[in-house]
Each structure stands twice: as structure tokens, then as C-alpha cells.
Amino acid sequence: MITRSSALLQRPAPETKPLTPETQPLPVQARWQTQLAGAIRDPHELCRRLGLDATWQGGAARGHALFEVRVPEAYLSRIRPGDPSDPLLRQVLPLIEEDRSVAGYVADPLAEAEHTPAKGLIHKYAGRVLLIASPACAVNCRYCFRRHFPYEENAPSRAQWEASLDYLREDATIREAILSGGDPLAANDRRLAWLVERLEAIPHLKRLRLHTRLPVVIPDRIDAALLDWLGATRLQKVMVLHINHAQEIEEAVVAACRRLREAGVTLLNQSVLLRGVNDDVDALAALSERLFEAGILPYYLHVLDPVSGAAHFDVADDEARALVAELREVLPGFLMPRLVREIPGEASKTPL
Ligand code: SF4
């Protein structure tokens, strides 16, 4: 029998090639940041790279003028070229429909501006406070309810962070700090470690929750530097990922989720029910199954927030309820996301 060690002894020495600037590995910390910086931001390039014909270019340019295109290569690689109906493409490709004004669709559909007691801090629900940890995202999702959010007015300096931290320190009813954005993981690890260190020094805080799409969009974001500060905190850690379609969960995403779970992070997912992306029972069932394979529990299925520019993604409430009823027939209960709507002023999400 050949043991593992004897097999290693018999293996010829690998041929060593000198490292050139092209083959030299990037420092781990630079990998995700380089990918983030290199994301496609030109609608024409996006169409060209995906083999979309000229009929898509005008709408893409118009939508881009309203909310800029941003698609990193790691996400682009999961989109089928030449297929305008690809469910990942539909989430990132601007369309002329974004320029249509539709009654009831507004810039701030959740009235967040009314719940901002300090710069970069949103306090809507009892016991939980949301901090805008980064104004940037790795990908710009066309249906995003914060596509018009005034990030420039909500990008706190360290001194302003202290004001937000004072708010948390003074309210002993707050149990959970939620890092959001933009995408909180678009911030660098030094900044996040600094913030989490201060949060965990607040005795009444029990949980740290992160709402992020970065582990899905650029799985290399889940690197050793991130796991260092995240794994070390005394706070219980919950990460709510944002995945809308099973095709988004490639093997690199599964591996990133494994690293997070090993660091003690509970993984949940929230999706948005989107016309042309996941508005059929097969797509929703496949999403729940694939999430569970990756160690993520389906948590919420949101109906679309009525943000201006995104009306073409809407699925009517009756259709949403019918889809979920069908889904219940094919999935075990623990794979069923809760169908909800967020209504401004309500004390929690509203089940449909
Ligand atoms: S906040 Fe989330 S949904 Fe909105 S653009 Fe960023 S990643 Fe997409």
C-alpha cells in the first residue's frame, strides 16, 4: 500500500519557475481590493463583454446615468454571455425602464431619512441599530432600495463615529449593532476592526450583524485579515447575505461561507423577489436548496421596495403569495424564507 507520505517521497520535485510580475501572487489583502477597484463601470463595456447587441447599449447608458454600473469580474464570470435573460445579468444591467416615472415609486421608499439620529446611524427597530459602515458596494444592483441614498451625507469620520457609538452606549435597550451600507465589507479591515473593537466594549451589546453581498460578489473578500477581527470578537456574529438566484452560489462562494462558519458566524440569506430573476417556483426552490448546501439558511424573501427606477422588477402581492404557497409544497419548512414587506413606520417587517 502506498501511504500518503511515501507517495510524497516518490513524487518528482516540482519544476520551479522564476516569479515574474505577472505570476507573483498578489498580497492577500490586495486581492479583493484590486478586484473591487477593477470592477466594470462602463455600460458599453458591460454589453460588449457579455456579447449583447447594440439594442441594449442606449438603455444601459441611460440607466447608468441614473445609477452607475458596477460589476466585478468575479460576478461577471457567472453570467452567460449572449443571454439577455440571464438572471444575474438582469440584476446588474441598466435598462431604459429605469428612466420611467411610476406612481408610488420614490427615492427613499423606507423613509430612512426620518430615522437618522446621528450621521451614518439608522434606528428604526427596537433593540437594533444600523450603522452605515461603508458607502460603497461591490456591485450596483439595479433594484436596490438605497440607489438614491445620500451616502455623501452619511459617511462619518472617526469623530462622527464616536457620536454614533455614544448613541449606542447611552441606550441600554440596544442589543444588536447591524453593519450595513452600501456594503460594510467594502470598508477595509483596519477600519472594521477599529469599529468592532469599540462596539464590543459596550457591555449591553450582544450581537453583531452584517448585511453584505461581498462574499457572494467577490468571495476572496473572506480572507485571513477579515477572519482575524471577525473571529476574535466576543459578540455573537450573524451575517445576512443577499443572494437572489442559485446561479450566484459558485464553489468559491461555498468555500467563503465555510470559512465564515468556521469563524463562528451564523449565515442567513435574504432575497428580493424580482421579475425576470427569481419569479418562478423552480428558481426559488433551487435557491433555497443551494443556500442550504452552502450552509446558509433562507431567512427573508422581500417583495420589492418601491424605489424609483426599479418598478420593472415588481411582482404583485397576489402572485408573490401564490408562488410561496407553491414553494411550500416542494420544500421542507426550514428551507422556506418568510415573505415580507418593509413598511415605513412599522415596528418590524410585515409578513404578506
Ligand atoms: S446595498 Fe446591497 S442591494 Fe444595494 S447596490 Fe449595494 S449590494 Fe446591491
Image (cartoon, rainbow, N blue to C red):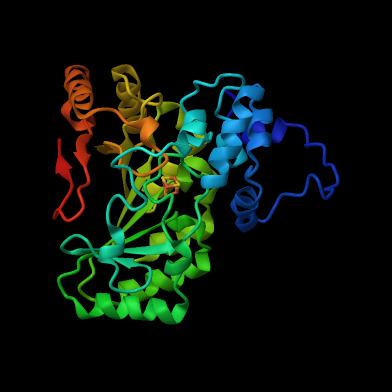
Residue 70 in sight here: no
Q: Residue at coordinates 50% horizontally, 56% vertically from top-left?
A: 136
Q: Position of residue 261 (x, y in %)?
A: 37, 47
At x 63%, y 51%, the residue is 31
Q: Quadrant of residue 198?
A: bottom left
Quadrant of image for the N terminus? top right
Q: Is residue 110 above or below residue 116?
A: above
How many marks are shown on the rendered structure? 0
The quarter of the rendered structure image containing the C terminus is top left
Tell which of 199 and 158 is nearer to you.
158
Instruction: Residue 268 in the image: state x and y as whole percent.
Output: 30, 43
> In the displayed structure, would residue 126 be above or below residue 21?
below
Residue 109 in the image: above or below residue 176: above
Q: Is residue 194 left or right of residue 128?
A: right
Residue 17: horizontal and vertical position, in percent? 84, 42
* Residue 225, position as x, y percentages in the image: 52, 60
Indicate left or right for 140 with 56 as reference.
left
Q: State whether residue 183 is above or below residue 302.
A: below
On the question of residue 29 being in view, the answer is yes
Question: Residue at the location (15% across, 71% down)?
Answer: 173
155 sits to left or right of 8: left
Horizontal arrangement in the rendering, residue 249 relative to residue 2 (left or right): left
Q: Which of the 4 image quarters holds residue 182?
A: bottom left
